[in-house]
Image: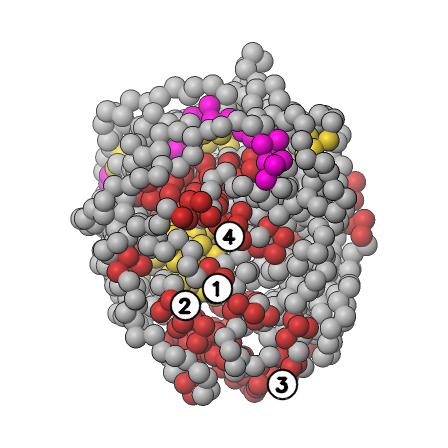
Amino acid sequence: MPQPSQTGPFRPTSSQFAYTAAPSSPSSPDTNANAYSNLGGQNLPDSAFLSPEQVDNAPFFGRRGSAQLPAPSIISRSSLMLPGTPNIGGNRSSWSSSAGLAGAEAPLAGAEVGRHPYAPRGQSNLTQTTLGWNDTGNDRTFATREEMTERNGNMGAGAASGNSSERVPRWASGGHDPKKRRKWLWIGIALAALLAVGLAVGLGVGLSRRLNEKTVSRDPAQDNSGATRSASASGTMTATASTSAPSATPTSGGQGSLITFEDGSTMTYNNPFGGQWVWDPANPFNNDAQCNSWTPALSQNWTWGVDKIYGVNLGGWLNTEPFIVPALYEKYAVGPNNQTAIDEYTLSQNMGSNLTAAMTEHYATFITEQDFAEIASAGLNWVRIAVPHWAIETWEEEPYLEHVAWTYFLKAIQWSRKYGIRINFDLHTIPGSQNGWNHSGRLGSINWMYGIMGTANAQRALDYIRTLAQFISQPEYSPVIQIYSFINEPNGGPVGKPPIGSFYYEAYQIIRDITGIGEGNGAVLSMQDAFLGITSWYGFLPGADRLALDQHSYLVFGNQSTASLDAIAKFPCQYWGEATNVTSQTWGLNIAGEWSAASNDCGLWVNDVGVGSRYDGSYKGYNGPTPGSCAYWNDYTLWNQSTKADILHFVEGSMDAFQNYFFWTWKIGNSTGAIEQVNPFWNYQLGLKNGWIPSDPRSAVGTCAGDLAALNEFDGTFSSAWMTGGVGANTIEAAMSTLYPWPANSFANIEAAYMPYLPQYTQTATPITMPGPTYTSPGSSATIFAGNGWFNPTADARNAYTAVAGCSYPPEYSAALLPVPTSACGAGMVQPTRRDSFPAPTPAPAR
């Protein structure tokens, strides 16, 4: 065995793992309002955060959520800047950081007791009834809609409605068989009585997941009228049927038409761009809706290089972030042991017994159908929806609310279809955290493709990527979900390109094995540049079928510019205009999955909870320029017309430079603090109403030419047909498998010789199948077939990963710096991986 070195990557130790969970934290009360009232932009004491993890010389790349150390702006990445690109402040090196990544190794007290993947789950006290869920005990308190309305106000347009006895949708685990260590029953039903249009669309979702044992298969021959549909032999899905009377409500309309929402409220459709909405209860998969006159209807083909993405993110909805939904975090600011809510992990813990009610209320009210109608009316045509992995399932160390987010994602598909909006499905979180930032679920350290749990967490992630690919590739959903961003923002600084490339290639092969090859077969796949710069990926997987390169470009997470706002307004065209065109010519499909109107890092929790701003010098550890106070920038009501005009110029320059983009984010929730509407730079909806976001995104075209920026124009024709699924698609040279093998040969902090010692999960579980909604034919109790969740039963027939029975694994989120053991669960296991051959390109399915 190689001898350990003092400075190199981690080596094995002679001791075996014996991880002991911390004591359980008590349930937190539902009374934390205004607990953040005195935090403002102040730095919290170190004890309020997770203990830092030092990663030697690892640059901390990133966007919002870089709490511990200054993060360089995206424009500091040399691979993103073409020759001749001007620098801010004249010193390019000042925009990068050589400081170590700080994260979390020590778990919070009570965070992980009894929550390892091999540990039994406590039995729920819920029982299923024909009306939904009836609580016979109180393991997690929930409220009736009347109670929620009384306590929290009107749930808003688009929220599900029902009678006073209807319970908030929730999920429950079944009984535990003590003879089987990994037997879980998860069944969920979310009933929404959609009475206004005479259609009961119960987005009832049921899911059975059993680990370490075979799940009972369903009968695939069951007819469409049955309440239970079979996906394949991989998992169980239950849908609840309901009845409704025929409706005379209009099923389509344009400008000036009356729209009736699920709760019976109405809105006049104000779409000046020729948009046509369509929603027919008798045909819920009608794809004739068109968001505007220049965007193809969902039933028509999208032509890359011709059609343009004008999109927004729906951030903070299904995957919360403190700076997007501050009031939610303020309400549960402090939990057991004075734990501060800094991410959804700690937020979920602080919610305690109120988790189901509080999160369900958030899902139901933060984004509603009205938002989708307004998005179409703003001239936008795409949404990027961040979905967490706990929408699929949770394992025992994860305190998140499982499954319920999926119910609301199904609503998002319906609303997108109704208004002709396409979806970029973004898997925003990965087990163990792919970047260590709060929007990955848990702020702290990276435990994906890094550290001793890097392989095991990646194995879980690949299972989820496969499950989601099977669902979104079904013909019922593929016309709406046309981009699949299968992992959000890997932190390329510490992790490095080789391990990320290995994961990307494995995920690509799994997905394309499911979809088939060639235009029209499944979604475009989007891989994020991992903040390594877009040019660093040129030459990766040449010949890949419809693989888009995604950049998330922000100016503000590094040294703050001292230039005037008028000068900063021209930066997007100078930095990104030519780079986008060159990428289109060299790589092929590319998008800007995230960007904002921010010219500085002012705002509430933009850099994390309790962390100040670099701009005003309140960011602990930042030593760069501090141009001045944030008071003016934090309160948009103080902005004069000159300020709004400069920000508008910045926004239109970004739109013109990126060409295909998703603004981060559509809306920012209110705060309970002195300034109610915080973080205006990041709020598209607010800017649209107040003049720093264009009312017609097409007005941005030509901004970069007007700024006299070098552009090297792309003419809309890609250099190779395979880039868009044409001739040569998926002809990837064999050398790529050598360069990017699966499993990865090594990690940045673990040498190749020690990779066989890492813990692994075993492929002995039944894959999860995600359920669709339940649609009922008007005037009938018969359900309309909504897919079975598993598009291609012949693809990749491997079992799913699960814990080795009786084994103790290192903690999911805090194992990055633990030493490699000489013996670990699943170590050295050789398991089936991807397929190395694919079918020839096939004709696109008919629509």
Label 3 crowding class (10 Å Cα cut-off): few <14, some 14-19, many 20+?
few
* Residue 154 falls within the magenta-colored stretch: no
Q: Which of the two labelled residues, at mark 2 and mark 1, occupies the earlier sequence position?
A: 1
Q: Please, what is the three-letter code of the amino acid marked with disc 3?
A: Ser
* Residue 754 falls within the magenta-colored stretch: yes
Of the numbered discs in the image, which one, if any, rests on residue 63? none
Of the numbered discs in the image, which one, if any, rests on residue 488? 4
Q: CA distance from mark 3 to mark 2?
A: 30 Å
| Residue 679 appearing in the image | yes
Q: Nearer the viewer, mark 4 or mark 1?
A: 1
Q: Nearer the viewer, mark 1 or mark 3?
A: 1
Q: CA distance from mark 4 to mark 1?
A: 15 Å
Q: CA distance from mark 4 to mark 3?
A: 33 Å
Q: Which residue is mark 2?
A: 583
Q: Nearer the viewer, mark 4 or mark 2?
A: 2
Q: Which of the two labelled residues, at mark 1 and mark 3, occupies the earlier sequence position?
A: 1
Q: Which residue is mark 1?
A: 534
What's the residue at 46%, 84% (across, down)?
709
Does the residue at mark 4 contact the one at mark 3 (Cβ under 8 Å)?
no
Q: Nearer the viewer, residue 176 or 215?
A: 215
What's the residue at 38%, 83% (across, down)?
702
The image quarter in which residue 788 lies: top left
Q: Which residues are magenta?
A: 752-778
Q: Which residue is mark 3?
A: 564
**Element on which disc 2 rests:** helix
